Structure formats: structure tokens, C-alpha cells
Amino acid sequence: MPKLEEGRVATAYMAHESDLKGDNAPYNEHAYALSQSRTSHADGDLYQVNGVRWFPSAPDPIPTHPYVWERIMHYTAAGVNDQTSYICLTGAVGAMGKLCYMAGEYRDDVEYTSNDSQTVAVEVSGTNDTTDIYYLNAESNWPDGTAQSAIGPTDGIVIDGKPVWVQGMSQYNLVRARYLFADFAQFGAAVVSGDWLISVHGTINGTAYEGEYTDPDTYINTDPNTGKNVTNPTYFWFDPAYPNEDHAGKDKVPGSPSEGQWASDHHNFIPHYAVNLLTGKTYQNDAYIRGEVHATSGEFGGVLKKSKTIITSANSSQYIYHDTGLEADMLDIVKAGTNVVFSDLSESIMIMMPGLYGYGSSNYSKNYKDFVRSLIGNVLLLYNYSSKEILITGNTSSQENYGATSFALSPNKACVMECKVRQYVPLTSDDQSFEGYEDVYWLSRVFSIN
């Protein structure tokens, strides 16, 4: 079909195949289809839409018909189809790639293995405090007996025309990622494996190991090619069933180098730190917690030491608050703790100890009752190193069986107060109806200090 354009200079023009039809020139027609087979373009294997199987442009593959076919129909100058060709444009599925895992810094005394499913990458010190990464390219063990153990990744060894070690990354010292998904990964001294995050540092049978461990036992299915005891990362011997307990004789622990049984006296790896990311349960050797600890149950071994809180006029508002319901200033025991020292008070103060009086129980809120009951069994130490008196009010008593008496904590005096519970004993005829109700009080003893 003639083309029309404006201007004095003609544009370079190549005719479309449709423009050649009927103009005494041969041409091709192209069409595309989706097939469920890489070797067949028969109608029964093709995807169709309302009976149409061949389309003017290539459609996107779908799961049931993943192969794109092209049909090329050649027409003579007379418009006769004298040849039709079919080409599958989708290539064959390639072989599955190898899993490459990091094995830390390259060592001459370690044997590395590569096969059709996995290979190993090692770190080699580079220049300017950087590190180069090499992966084992040959499908064999290294050293393989044909080379000395001193020959390493940087020596350019070639076996059967194939380099044994290939440099995968050069001079890296920083990796940045916006998203990272890993079912198994090592980050410095930490390893993520399944539901666990563990340290590579820990103990095996009471001996400390830092990252690597050579198994002294012989596996039942020892590698017949070497017969060697292999050095592997410590976490290969981590047993999720015993994260904090030595356990000898465990069979077929997931992740063991040969997936075989251990000798009867083999011990598992106990990391210095381990957390189950599914349950949130944590195991660790030591901890220093600067903030609050909230727990519903548990136990402490040895002596439980209580830190000291010093209350002065300058910071008293942090530990003493006004309760509008009780119309009293209260000592915040949760914040202040159980070892309290008063110092540098500019004036005398009065604080009320939380408690439950038998005759007033109906006036307290449920939250307040629950809080007071949670204090039962706690022992509170109050030291007055200031020059002002501290008036202690509330349900305090120097008698175990009855009574509620306020008292003044004079300068250079201290008191030990234990929160206890007893049956309420009426002191007047006005509160006889509350006899026998719970009475949460503070048993107090006052003594002098130097």
C-alpha cells in the first residue's frame, strides 16, 4: 500500500510484510500459541480461547501451558502457502543450581566438598582489610590427593581443564539489603536455622569452642574416600531438643555432617545464647537487664540481690505519687523497689503504704485489690538518712494479730516492713460485721542505723 508523507526529504522506509501481499513478492505470516508440551504443537496440546489457538502476538505463558510456540507460514509471490515452520520459543528447564554455603575463613587443615547439589564458599583475606570470596567449582573433595594441602583458592589450580576454585566476590566489607529472607543463615557469630537463633560459641561436653569443632568419634557411615574426622561448625551438633542440656548418644541430629548416628558417648553443642523464635524461649549464659523485669513465675538460684533506690526532694515525684481515690501520697513500690534510702529531704513527708482493711474492702477497686495482694510476701527496707521525719501511715502494724498504727521514721532510723495477710480483727463495735475478712498489712520493725 502506498505511503504518504509531507516534506522534501523521504524517510527511509522498509515495507511491512502485509504491504507486500499481492505485489508479486513472497512474504511470511507469524502466529503464536501456548502448548502444554515442549515437543508438540498439535491442536490437542494448545491452549484455546473460543476456538482460537494461534494469535498474532506471543501470549504470556500460563501454568498449564508454559511453552510458547511460533508458526511461520511462507507465501509465494502468487499468495500460495508453500511452507510452514514451527519453533518452540521456550527453552528446556535447566538443571537445578547448587546450594552454596559459607564455611568461614579458608583453612589448609579442613576438607571441603562439592557435588551436584551443593558447594562451599570460603573467605580469603584480601587487601586493605577486605575479604575475597571463593567457591569450590570442582565436584570433588578438596584437597583431593592430587595437590598439596598448602595449595589454596588463590593458586589457580585447574583439574581436567576446569578451575577448582572460582572467585565469586572480590574485596567486600559491606552488604546492604532492604529485605532478606533466609531459612538458614550465619551472621557473624549468630546462626539462624529454622525456628532457632543461636551463637556459634558454646560448649561440647563442658569444653568451650569458638565456632568450630572436630568430632573425635567415628561415624557409622564415615566417608570411605577419606576416613577422616571432619572439622565443622559447632552448630552442626546443636540439638533443638536439648538447647540447654548436655545429652550424649543422640542419634541422627538434623544438620549433622553425614546425617548419621553418633557414637554412644557423643555430646551435643550447647550455645552460649539460643532463642526459639517460634516460642520466644531464650537460653543464655549471662544477662544484665537495666530496665524492669516482668514475670508470672520462675525461680532464682543463689542470692537474689536488690539494688538501692535513693529518694531525695529533687526526685521524690518519680517515686511518690498522689492517689486521688485514697486521698494520700503513696510510695510507688514497683518503681522504687524494696531497698529504699531517703536522703536530702528539705521537709518532712508523709507516705501511705498500700493495704486492705477488712472494714474497707468494699471501697477498693478490683485493680487496687489485685495489686495489694501481689505484694504479699515482699519485704521492704526503708532507711532515713535525711534530717527530716518520714511519717508512715496506712495499714501498718507492729503486731502480727491485730492493729493498724502509723509511726514516724526519725532521722538515722530504718524499718523493715513485710507485707502479710491476716483475718481482720475489729477494734470497735462499729465494724463487727467485717470480722474475719482479709486484712493485708505491713508488719513493721524500727531500728537505729549508724
Image (cartoon, rainbow, N blue to C red):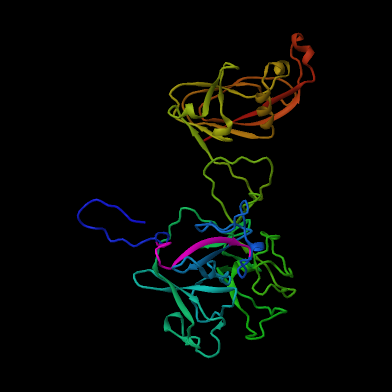
**Quadrant housing the N terminus:** bottom left
Q: Is residue 206 left or right of residue 151?
A: right
- Say if residue 29 shows up in the picture: yes
Q: How many marks?
A: 0
Residue at 53% in and 61% down = 32
Query: Residue 87: horizontal and vertical position, in percent?
Result: 54, 69
Depth order, front residue of 55/418:
55
Q: Nearer the viewer, residue 396 or 231?
A: 231
**41 on left or right of 83:** right
Residue 373 image-quadrant placement: top right
Residue at the image point whose x is 68% and y is 45% from the top: 298
Residue 300 in the figure: left or right of residue 422 = left
Residue 77 among magenta residues: no
Of 167 and 377, which appears nearest the observer? 167
Q: Residue furthest bottom?
A: 146
- Image point (49%, 57%), residue name: 57
Picture coordinates of residue 43 (x, y %)?
Answer: 64, 62
- Image: 306 above or below 420: below
Residue segment shown in magenta: 20-36
The answer to whether residue 27 is magenta is: yes
Residue 378's image quarter? top right
Q: Is residue 425 left or right of residue 176?
A: right
The x and y percentages for residue 325 are: 60, 17
| Vertical position of residue 396 compared to residue 139: above or below | above
